[in-house]
Amino acid sequence: MSLTNYLVLAAILFTIGAVGVLVRRNAIVVFMCIELMLNSVNLTLVTFARASGTVDGQIMAFFVMVVAAAEVVVGLAIIMSIYRTRRSASVDDASLLKY
Amino acid sequence: MVQAPEISLAALAPLLFVLGAACVGVLVEAFGPPEGRHRVQVAVALVGTLGGLVTSLLLAGERQVTAGGALAVDGPAVFLQATIAGLGALSVLLFAERSLDPARSAFVAAAAVPAGSPRDRELMTSSRVQTEVYPLTGFAVGGMMLFVAANDLLVMFVALEVLSLPLYLISGLARRRRLLSQEAAVKYFLLGAFASAFFLYGLALVYGATGSVRLADIRAAAAVGGTDLLLVLGLALLVVGLMFKASVAPFHAWTPDVYQGAPTPVTAFMAACTKVAAFGAILRLLYVAFGTSEWTWRPLVYGIAIVSMVVGAVLGLTQTDLKRMLAYSSIAHAGFLLTGVLGLNGGADAAGSGLGATMFYLLAYGLTTLGAFAVLTLVRDGAGEATHLSRWAGLARRSPLTAAVMALFLLALAGIPLTSGFTAKFAVFRAAIDAGAWPLVVVALLASAVAAFFYLRVIVLMYFAEPVVDGPTVGVPGLPTTIVLAVTVTATVVLGIAPGAVLDVAERAAIFVG
């Protein structure tokens, strides 16, 4: 199977993630969509590593995973703290700051 | 057998100093006794940032690529590292201010306690302070210093996250108006993570197009196949990710909300240091990696600069909150900075005046905006800082000194002669005209004129309006804030009247390596 298929799949996953961030309302779901975008990047990196016959891309995918894990810790802490006050994780409810 | 990369510890000293101090801060937080911890943490954070400042000043004139080619320690990197470390030290002083708020700190006593709960109200009046904010700031400063020296897209990405993650946290730690602060943190986090996903996808596409993420290799590959679709797409996505951090319109949606919701000392830190770091990375990416394929990004940056200046200046007019107004001012200034970015023609080796001018602008703007936010922490009423414009009416009669200092900063932001803002704007506009971008400079001058209106409106309000009854009080700053105000006022005046020496240093530092 041609490697292009994997790149197209990754691009589709990235787009689904990006659209999800823009249309979903729950902060947790928005965050999951961002994780989907990061994982589509991993797929792209691994595919390009395969295509070029080097391991650089695979190592970069590890870096991305570690950074994504750190981001989850910080992100969930922030979302939790606002949830405990408001009893809601909807990004529409958080609307004190505007104009 | 894996060959260990060659690492020059001397060239990495500023980074090691700042990050080492942050690690010590974590240990103090874990094992130090709670009483007296605040003083120790402030001392550790100051030693780290000032050490970073001194070591980077000692590195002046250094030109080398180290750590296996991952870091470039060159003129722009050292100049911007010194700027970030210095502004970071001033921000730490603002964080350490304890005599303004009756609760003795701008930061929440226990971030895990839900806002508005009985326990929260109890803690509100206690004099307990939280000190996690100092090591977090240390890591953010370290990440920013790494960001401007990154010679590799992957290192750039890791640095981007190291600087962003602590910022997401500390912007949610306000002592008062906690809901607003938490909301700012959520917005900053979700949009920031969204932008770094774009940066990362750009990284992957550039890797696919060139087979490397090293900036020098990308430059070599771009020189051959500069119009490769994959490469151009990757470049565009990288630029989007970086422009987001630099709060350039149209990627500015988070800026006003986060600037308003975050604790004011944190806003000062973000406005000054993040801007410097993000522009450092933009300059390095565009000139080192894509210096040979200039015509693929020039029109894009040209358009973004115009949008940013217009959006910042026009929307700034409608603001009624001072923190929000300064946020839109920061968006407009990002546009002015981009005119400087466009003012450098030639490749990475050309010592163009645009690069030096942009670095001088970053230094001048960072100091002025830090000072302006420091003044905002002084004017308070029962609910904390009084940032609504109407509350500032007639402030000059209540406290002539505060009003005069604020007026100076606003004049500098507007770019009035004899302040640092004028010198900086003059330098970037001249560089842009030299590069033939005069239509952009015409737009920039018009935007400056519009922006000057909302700065001057605050000055008129402070000096010529009747004071409001039961208006805000002006707090007497303690030693830390006094130092910050003294340094920023001096710098704003000196860089306006006698900028020669500093401009010269910036010009001489303006050579990229790599």
Image (spheres, helix red, strand yellow):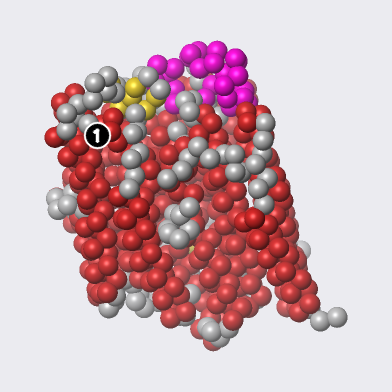
- Residue placed most toward the observer, B21 or A73: A73
Badge 1 marks a residue whose secondary structure is: helix
Vertical position of residue B166 compared to residue B246: above or below: above
- Residue placed most toward the observer, B182 or B137: B182
Amino acid type of disc 1? Ala
Which residue is found at the position 33% from the left and 61% from the top? B310
The answer to which image quadrant residue B298 occupies is bottom left
The extreme bottom residue here reads B224
Main SS, magenta residues: loop
Q: Count the marks: how many?
A: 1
Residue B213: where, in percent of width, then height?
60, 69
Residue B431: where, in percent of width, then height?
26, 69
The answer to which image quadrant residue B31 occupies is top right
- Magenta span has B182? no
Question: Crowdedness of circle 1 by 10 Å Cα count: few (<14), some, many (20+)?
Answer: few
Which residue is found at the position 52% from the left and 83% from the top? B226
Q: Which residue is mark 1?
A: B486
Which residue is found at the position 38% from the left and 61% from the top? B308
Vertical position of residue B58 compared to residue B115: above or below: below
Q: Is residue B40 visible?
A: no
Magenta stretch: give its range.
B101-128
Residue B295: where, in percent of width, then height?
43, 81
Vertical position of residue B373 compared to residue B41: above or below: below
